[in-house]
Amino acid sequence: MRITQGCFSFLPDLTDDQIRAQVQYCIDKGWAVNIEFTDDPHPRNTYWEMWGLPMFDIKDAAAVMMELAACRKAYGNLYIRISAIDSSPGWESLRLSFIVNRPEEEPGFQLRRQESNGRNILYTTHPYAVDQPEGQRYVSRSIETNKAAYPPVLLHKDSAGPNLEGGGKSR
């Protein structure tokens, strides 16, 4: 099943050049750009893990693309999205959000029905992915590389993104 959330969700996955063009559009509009990731893409799960801090004062999409590459390196087996936030008076809201990375296998959702008072039926969606504990939801199926979905990463002292070298405490 292909998760369809955010802008461009019914189009084929965007190439890096297309992502760069969308990011530059956001920057040109004065919107802050943010990279987020999750292993639980339920439609009501709006709070994904942040990759560093939102990038407020950047002028070129290259900085976002560099952070996206680092996020893909650390969490390439999870969902990654780019969001753009408009802090203009009267908006102060999300303006654009789209998925830029997906796991190889997307298990999908199950529709659950529950009878309630007066023969009412309540419906909810349950993601198959959350049947596994966090960190094991999109584990590689390879016997040789059975790594957890969330490898330990630490914040680098000079950047908003993580230090992929590891070996120390986050600040």
Image (cartoon, rainbow, N blue to C red):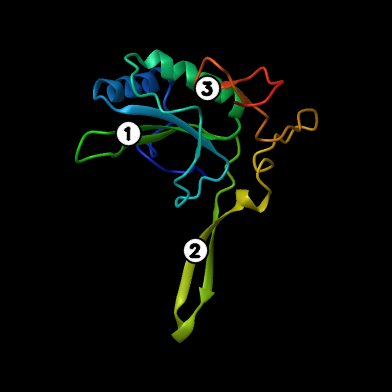
* Location of residue 113 with respect to 106 vertically, above or below: below
Looking at this rendering, what residue extends furthest in the right direction?
A: 144
Mark 2 belongs to which amino acid? Thr
* Location of residue 166 with respect to 85 vertically, above or below: above
Residues under labels 3 and 2: Cα distance? Answer: 35 Å
Q: Residue at x 59, y 26 (%)?
A: 171
Mark 1 belongs to which amino acid? Ile
Q: Position of residue 158 (x, y in %)?
A: 52, 14
Q: Earlier in the sequence, mark 1 or mark 2?
A: 1
- Classify residue 14 as left or right of residue 106: left
Task: Tell me the SS state at disc 1.
Answer: strand
Residue of label 3: 161
Residues under labels 3 and 1: Cα distance? Answer: 18 Å
Q: Position of residue 3 (x, y in %)?
A: 48, 43
Q: Residue at x 35, y 37 (%)?
A: 7
Task: Tell me the SS state at disc 3.
Answer: loop
Task: Tell me the SS state at disc 2.
Answer: strand
Give neighbour class at mark 2: few <14, some 14-19, many 20+ (Cα, 10 Å). few
Q: Nearer the viewer, mark 3 or mark 2?
A: 3
Residue of label 1: 85
Mark 3 belongs to which amino acid? Gly
Q: Residue at x 60, y 39 (%)?
A: 105
Residue of label 2: 124
Q: Residue at x 44, y 46 (%)?
A: 46
Q: Front-most of 158 and 60?
A: 158
